[in-house]
Amino acid sequence: MKKKLIFISLDTVRADVAYSGKFGGVNKLRKDGITFLNTISSSPLTPVSHATVLTGLQPYNHGIRHLFKEKLNPKVETITQILKRYNYKTGAIVSCPGMNKWYDFCRGFDSYDDEIPRLVDGSDPLKTVDVRKRGTALKRGEIVAERACKWIDKNKNEDFFLFLHFFDAHWPYEAPKKFGGDNVYEEEVAYSDHYMNLFINKLKEEGLYDDVTIVCFSDHGEDLDGMYENDKGGEKLGHPEELGHGCLLYDQTQKVIFILKDQDLKRGKNIMQQVRLVDITPTILNLLNIDYEKNKYNGISLLPLINNNKKLNLLGYSETFYPTEQTRAGSGKFNNIRNKKSFRINNKYKIITEIDSDKIEFYDLENDENELNNLNKNYFEI
């Protein structure tokens, strides 16, 4: 039996903030679904991470590894294309340059609304690699929710897949309306959450909510220059190159939201085992009873974990090539920063390596959850 499916991306929302209990929409989904408390993103960049979600592949296989350099590998099939083969009606409403049609995320979508304004200086926001400057060009959550409700009105009787993308929590943290939160960043999170909640209420009014499958996730988090105790970005904390996200791979950007609501799954369940965003597509295909070649994905179905608490031991892989991209774009004062890869192991350990360098960081997450004590202070010499 087919299921109506909705993906909701809350861009730039940290897991610890989302799960703090302050946000009604997130709380509602958590009450009705399954929360994966330790979900790892493949990248701290919007296009790279979303490509992983839509393909079930890591960046080295789906082809997008930079903020603005590559398009999706033409040989890769997205979940949207698969669902289209099963005659799903498909639509997307996205909100920032990093989700533009240029990246080819629109494959398989009947409609793909990526309209956003130009930058204040009139330039194309897609063509800047400055994540903060890009963040000023967005479609606000109010518009996303409004257009999503109209899409539901037109397609509620179809088997559908709708992808919604809320970008409000991105810098510059100037929510046009205040709906809660304890600081300027959380006010933006509350803004996204408010309009997501309005959309959820629309589903309830239409009698769709109980039956529809919802995946709510964030693509990456945000390092807020000391606003939270695990922050490491900014001049005072020693990483002036980290302007919110992009250059570092600590948990404040790599631990993300993942909530799954489905009528056939348990309600209100929290899962502590480490999972990854790369597991979303295989899990949903399995949940929809769609045959798929398991060996073609880097992610796996999480249904054995959900239904039987099977221990999976999933390695959390993350990467960023943004440092060199930023340097080549003319950020001269950051010439010494390097690309990185990280490996997060069973919520116990974290290894961060610099590409083209001998530097390795090693953290004991059970005793140092904020990644403040690098146990490899003198670095390994390779």
Image: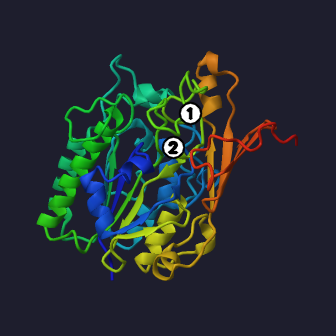
Q: Are marks 2 and 1 in contact (CB under 8 Å)?
A: yes
**Residue under label 1:** 232
In which quadrant of the rendered image does the N terminus lie? bottom left
Q: Amino acid at mark 1?
A: Lys
Q: Amino acid at mark 2?
A: Gln
Q: Is residue 241 left or right of residue 222?
A: right
Q: Is residue 52 visible?
A: yes
Q: Residues within 10 Å of mark 2 (few under 14, many from 20)?
A: many
The percent position of residue 257, horizontal first and vertical second, equals: 43, 55
**Residue drawn at (34%, 31%) of the image:** 173
Q: Is residue 261 above or below residue 25?
A: below
- Numbered mark located on residue 200 in the image: none
Q: Residues within 10 Å of mark 1 (few under 14, many from 20)?
A: many
Q: Is residue 311 left or right of residue 124?
A: right
The percent position of residue 35, horizontal first and vertical second, equals: 41, 64
What's the coloring here?
Answer: rainbow
Q: Nearer the viewer, residue 150 or 318?
A: 318
Q: Gap between marks 2 and 1, in whole Å?
A: 9 Å
The percent position of residue 55, horizontal first and vertical second, equals: 51, 59
Q: Residue furthest left?
A: 205
Q: Nearer the viewer, residue 314 or 98?
A: 314
**Residue drawn at (77%, 42%) of the image:** 376
**Residue under label 2:** 252
